[in-house]
Image (spheres, rainbow, N blue to C red):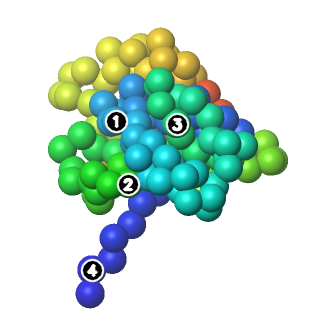
Amino acid sequence: MTLHWKLVMDSGDPHAQADFWADAMGYLVEDNSALIGQLLSQGHASDADTVESHGRRAWRDLIAVRHPDDPYDEGTGVGLGRRILFQRVPEAKTTKNRLHLDVHSAPGEREAEVERLEGLGATVLRRVKVPGGEWTLMSDPEGNEFCVH
């Protein structure tokens, strides 16, 4: 049996994180407004559970990004392929991530990609050069580490 999965990242501001990672990776912020409207009309959710994001209703504490080429459920807006879900948590990040993303730039374009990501709000932590390869260790706007190869 093959399992469907998504990566979930704790976040202080899930919508800002979703916007950063959508821009960083060329992903789309999911549109769950149809599902939210349905649940609101049935009384299963309240206005307090939602915010306006990108001109539409979104969950206040959850938002995901998905790869633009992957399928998604048109009734819910939920991606059925590569996704990252950002969920609001009350505590701030305090230690190094135990899991991180590696993003791969086009050959010879790593420095240009690092500069682009810095323009989106990422920070260079260090440049690594070891016998096995080279990469740039960065952090997203909330301090989550990721590598650019």
Q: Can you give x and y, in whole percent of width and height, for residue 53 in the image?
A: 53, 29
Considering only vertical position in the picture, is 2 above or below 36?
below
- State which tag comes first along the sequence, 4 or 2: 4
What's the distance in space between the residues labelled 1 and 2, CA to CA?
15 Å
Instruction: Using the image, tell me which numbered label, if any, was put on residue 70.
Output: none
Residue 54 visible at all: yes
Q: Which mark is residue 57?
A: 3
Disc 4 target residue: 2
Q: What residue type is labelled 1?
A: Leu
Q: In the image, what residue type sits under mark 3?
A: Arg
Left/right placement of residue 84 relative to residue 131 reads: right
Which SS class for mark 3?
strand
| Number of marks in the rendered image | 4
SS type, badge 2: loop
Which mark's residue is nearer the viewer, 3 or 1?
3
Q: Residue at x 67, y 49 (%)?
A: 46
94 or 78: nearer the viewer: 78
Q: Which amino acid type corresponds to the residue marked 2 in the rendered image?
A: Thr
Q: How crowded is mark 1: few (under 14 residues within 10 Å), some or many (20 or more)?
A: some
Is tag 1's residue or tag 4's residue first in the polypeptide sequence? 4
Mark number for residue 28?
Answer: 1
Q: Is residue 2 left or right of residue 134?
A: left
The residues bearing labels 3 and 4 have C-alpha atoms spaced at a distance of 33 Å
Question: In x, y percent, where is residue 94?
Answer: 78, 45
> Can you say which quadrant of the picture contains the C terminus?
top left
Q: How far apart are marks 4 and 2 (CA)?
A: 23 Å
Select label 3 or label 4 by which is in front. Answer: 3
